[in-house]
Image (cartoon, rainbow, N blue to C red):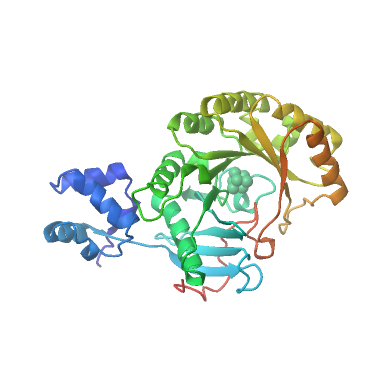
Amino acid sequence: MQTRLSNIKHLSRQELRQAIANLGEPAYRTRQIHQWIFSHRAATFEEMTTISLELRNKLADQFRIGFPILADCQQDGSANDPFSTVKLLLELDDNEKIETVLIPSENRMTACVSSQVGCPLQCRFCASGQTGFKRNLSADEIIDQVFSLNDFIRTKHESNEITNIVFMGMGEPLLNFENLKESIEVLSDQSYKFNLPQRKITISTVGIIPGINELGKSGLKTKLAISLHSASQETRESLIPVASEFSLTQLRKTLSEYTSQTGEPVTLVYMLLKGINDSVEDARLLVKFSRSFLCKINLIDYNSIINMKFKPVFNETKDMFIQHILDAGIHVTVRKSHGASINAACGQLAAKGTQKAENRNNL
Ligand code: SF4
């Protein structure tokens, strides 16, 4: 039986450099090949016309260039509505599936991407955490989500492009830091055809302190969002089990250091859950937590997930919460929920892949 060649895209830049050196080629070839793969998006080695035929043949003997398969595509609302949310189910080399979401708005095309297959953290309100953890995504698997969404947009309007990226899909990005960093460096490389300024990229974490420290030192200029959801240690632990390892006191100190180091505010994301974190006392604790570092607060509605006991709050409760934060002089926004009807909203990604793969390869 013929063995399947390994996918060259899965190599990190360091591994690619080593592979090229092993072929007896000079180091500058690494950059050329990387550009062919991630800027020109070559599907075969034959296309790499700036490198010698001999090297192209050597590469083709050892590697293949693989792409994720579009296993399903769901749209929230009419296909003609330019602002409807789109969810793609992508099948990876090892048949694992991940979801990635396009959130269009009047002046943005936001890609909400996954960083892991499943998630090990099992936050109580999140579907991704309930599916279990399979593995980290490689940098190219993260990058290909953005490219897949970009291709989807282009089928509608040739001039449109992804304008923002948020790491808010499946997985905890700061538990996959090296691949996260490499994917961001590639997606923001100005010499590549697709590139975004790093300030248009937001990393969302439940508060993995070593990861926040690493991010602060990394030199990346991305934005940081913290899924806080409660400023009471006890309530937070009941929602986010890993919060027992990273206390609110430690988190506040880390965020103070991070914002001093980067000069950038962080966004505290707070999902209002009826009867859980929506009282006046909860609002008071949130204000107190927010005072010691540069931040803004983003309130979001809970999207119902089958088999989960949480409920969204009434509008009056939300208004009270907002007023309390505003009275304290803290900037607060209320994020509209997108894609709930196709389970594409915050916390709803599970990549079960139960739908028939009717739309396979139809990008
Ligand atoms: S909220 Fe984020 S960290 Fe928590 S289980 Fe879901 S994907 Fe994982």
Residue at image point 20% right, 45% down: 28
Residue at image point 70% right, 35% down: 237
Name the side, left or right, on which 25 lies relative to 214: left
| Image coords of residue 295 (percent x, y) | 65, 33
| Image coords of residue 187 (percent x, y) | 42, 49
Name the side, left or right, on which 256 lies relative to 2: right
Residue in the foreground of this view, choosing between 176 and 167? 167
Q: Can you say whether 208 is above or below 194 in the image? A: above
| Image coords of residue 173 (percent x, y) | 52, 43
| Image coords of residue 191 (percent x, y) | 33, 49
Residue at image point 79% right, 51% down: 312
Q: Can you say whether 241 is above or below 169 in the image? A: above
Which quadrant holds residue 272?
Answer: top right
Residue in the foreground of this view, choosing between 213 and 63? 213
Residue at image point 78% right, 46% down: 273
Q: Can you say whether 157 is above or below 55 in the image? A: below
Task: Name the residue furthest right.
Answer: 316
Task: Name the residue furthest bottom.
Answer: 358
**The N terminus appears in which quarter of the rendering?**
bottom left
Q: Can you say whether 144 is above or below 215 in the image? A: below
Residue 91 is at least partly visible in this image: no
Residue 199 is at least partly visible in this image: yes
